[in-house]
Amino acid sequence: MYQHIKVPTQGQKITVNADNSLTVPDEPIIPYIEGDGTGTDITPVMLKVVDAAVAKAYGGKRTIHWMEVYAGEKSTRIYGPDVWLPEETLHAVRDYVVSIKGPLTTPVGGGIRSLNVALRQELDLYVCLRPVQYFRGVPSPLKEPEKTNMVIFRENSEDIYAGIEYEAQSDKARKLIKFLMDEMGVKKIRFPDTSGIGIKPVSIEGTERLVRKAIQYAIDNGKPSVTLVHKGNIMKYTEGGFRDWGYALAQREFGAELIDGGPWCKFKNPKTGKDIVIKDSIADAFLQQILLRPAEYSVIATLNLNGDYISDALAAQVGGIGIAPGANLSDTVAMFEATHGTAPKYAGKDYVNPGSEILSAEMMLRHMCWTEAADLIISSMERAIQSKKVTYDFARLMDGATQVSCSGFGQVMIEHM
Ligand SMILES: NC(=O)C1=CN([C@@H]2O[C@H](COP(=O)(O)OP(=O)(O)OC[C@H]3O[C@@H](n4cnc5c(N)ncnc54)[C@H](OP(=O)(O)O)[C@@H]3O)[C@@H](O)[C@H]2O)C=CC1
Ligand SMILES: O=C(O)CCC(=O)C(=O)O
Ligand SMILES: [Mg+2]
């Protein structure tokens, strides 16, 4: 029994089978977190659009029973001032298997640590999956935005996001710096008395489970390559490790063979017989390559911080973070969320593009194998954009566009279903 979560009186849980596939009832209960800031604008629109797509696709045979669960500012209003992520929210998200969330605020500098990161870590949602594709008619800064077609696999549980960080001049920072200097022979902390200190764990297991998912995705979806993006020239034992362990996994588990002595390697996709190339790119060079030669990249496997930067950069290439969806996945639990944040200056104005969260819901429907409803979301999004009735972010870059509100765009999508 939950304290504040109201379980719908109708509907059933989605369950996970022994092989990690899902059994999805016709009336699943799906938890959602509204989110802070513009989450309050976009989440209700997402719910409405998804309900319309499901109703249209299945004529009443299937229905989602939404169950609100709480995190962030709304949670502090309901559970008490210090309760940002209630235990029962974590329980519900785990127990109901598939969920969706709006963005949550993280203060810069001090204050609470990221709730978004906490959700991923607590539930061990180790894959952050962010597809980046172009919708015809979307304004983009590129001449040929359709050449950007990538899927990012961002490692979601390790790296600098583990939160091992100590404030400058705190007892813990001083203690750690002293340990590093006295016992580890570290001589290169330029200003030891005033340095904050961060530590980044990157493991073999963490790398392998992420890279395995990326390669399997390339196999299942007939993709030509997987690129390991890292900064291994500078961070040899974390980012360099990620690269080396990724290549080793491709050879050991997928039978990849070195190309011209390596380190690139390739193997035949067992489903199509076509080559899948495993390659790598240093993160700074990668960020210029995706602009200049985007067609050369397909599936991207990368560490947590690189993946964060790359997600927004690639989203910009196809029109911005107004239509950048994502999923956080473990082997069993899936939580869908947009790539963007709470965009606080627009909060409560019914203004921003709800597209990212709607497309995250589209990924959710596909994950549930509700393909017809997912397809309807894609086709109505395409038609809405082509009708040029769009939110401010597209309207300001499109000739002849009519600017509509956040809820207005949802309505345009529903009219085009
Ligand atoms: N997963 C999550 O919940 C995430 C949470 N955050 C958090 O969000 C807060 C704000 O972060 P911030 O750095 O401002 O990043 P945001 O992603 O919230 O916003 C940055 C800019 O992106 C554009 N943008 C964002 N959302 C939309 C949308 N729905 N439609 C159209 N354009 C959009 C706006 O651009 P313009 O100004 O050009 O209109 C906005 O100013 C922080 O607390 C951060 O930690 C950040 C990222 C992810
Ligand atoms: O947790 C946050 O506040 C930011 C997270 C983020 O930027 C992301 O996941 O892309
Ligand atoms: Mg980000």
Image (cartoon, rainbow, N blue to C red):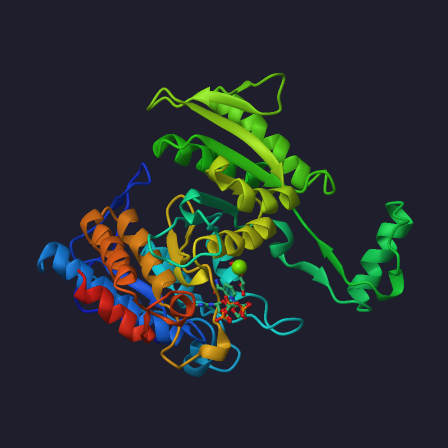
Name the residue located 86 percent from the left edge and 45 percent from the top edge: 184
- Compared with 22, 358 (above or below) is below
Which is nearer the eye, 80 or 32? 32
Q: Is residue 18 left or right of residue 8?
A: right
Position of residue 124 measured from the top left corner of the image (x, y, whole percent): 48, 51
Position of residue 271 measured from the top left corner of the image (x, y, whole percent): 33, 24
> Can residue 203 be spotted in the picture?
no
Position of residue 157 measured from the top left corner of the image (x, y, whole percent): 54, 50
Name the residue located 45 percent from the left edge and 70 percent from the top edge: 86
Quadrant position of residue 410: bottom left
Q: Quadrant of the C terminus?
A: bottom left
**Total marks placed:** 0
Quadrant position of residue 354: bottom left
Which is nearer the eye, 411 or 390? 390
Q: Is residue 167 left or right of residue 338?
A: right
> Can residue 324 be spotted in the picture?
yes
Name the residue located 14 percent from the left edge and 61 percent from the top edge: 55
